[in-house]
Image (cartoon, grey):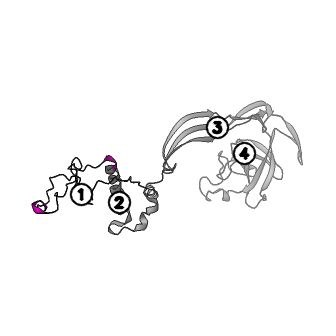
Amino acid sequence: MKIELKEIPPLGHELPLFAPWYPPHRIPASPAGGGGAASSKSFDSSLPRRQAGTGKPVVFSNDYKIAFLFVVLAAFSVFTLQGVEGVEESAAPQSDISTYLMSALPAKTDSFFRTETQTQETTLPYSTAFENSDELEIGTTLLKQEGKAGRLTQVYRVEFYQNQESDRLLLSRGQVEPQTEIILQGTKIIWRELETENGPIAYWRKIKVYATPYTAESAGKPLGSPGFGITATGTRAHFGTVAVDPKVIPLGTKMYIPGYGIGTAEDTGGAIKGNIIDLFYEGGNGWWNSGYVTVYLLD
């Protein structure tokens, strides 16, 4: 900070540096004369100082008062910043006091408070529905309607304070409903003929399954128990008994299994789920190698 002082016109005599301040800003004068009784009088602060030879009181001009005030304030600022009670001088360089003062203030950036708009989109999955069709052969399917995912769009106004979310307000919400996938399942029975080693047979459906063998001993019921060798339908297991998943092959259905012969769906099992079947064998009377096979439903 640069302070300019206006030149003060001479007042006709020297003014003491620390002169008392009297309204209306007058400074007491020294006793008139250089000797005699007048010079031996004590200093009377109640008497205004007068200009030599004029008898008029000395009055400070407004320019002088303003300049004096600035000098006092500037001196106080420099004195305070330069090292009162051990404060290092480098903390407040004289060359740039304003820079030092501004550095003490926190930098106000957009990380304090800011607001932004956020759009959030969520995919809504579609579902699948099945419909029976007597125009399609049983065991076949046809896509009637393609499934399409929906979309939920939400627009928020988000407020942040120091990069932390402080508030969230939902401005708008739009939703596109998903489109259900529809699949037709055939129910129409079409009889066909299959040539076998024992002659032709008529079937109305063929299914590819994974076939495994089982016996009464491997069925999980101990020998001698009331349920040993008894099927889920109450019959006693024998060659030709087939364990099935009733959701795939209804109980009571007769079928032809190449390499095994004719069988009937009479039993179920905990491990028989989906396109899996168990072929019953009496202990020691033949065996089946597990694997995929196409079975033909006869009735």
Between the C-alphas of marks 3 and 1, the distance is 87 Å
Q: Is residue 220 left or right of 254 when viewed as pictured?
A: left
Q: Earlier in the sequence, mark 3 or mark 1?
A: 1
Q: Residues within 10 Å of mark 3 (few under 14, many from 20)?
A: some
* Residue 40 visible here: no
Q: Nearer the viewer, mark 1 or mark 2?
A: 1
Kindly identify the amino acid type of the residue bearing the numbered disc 1.
Answer: Ala
Residue 151: which disc?
A: 3
Q: Earlier in the sequence, mark 1 or mark 4?
A: 1
Residue depicted at 74% across the width and 55% down the height = 212
Q: Position of residue 221 (x, y in %)?
A: 62, 56
Task: Answer whether residue 40 is magenta in the image.
Answer: yes
Q: Earlier in the sequence, mark 1 or mark 2?
A: 1
Identify residue for label 4: 265
Identify residue for label 1: 19
Of residues 227 and 150, the one drawn nearer to the viewer in this rendering: 150
Q: Is residue 84 left or right of 181 when viewed as pictured?
A: left
Q: Secondary structure at mark 4?
A: strand
Q: Is residue 30 left or right of 169 when viewed as pictured?
A: left
Between the C-alphas of marks 1 and 2, the distance is 18 Å
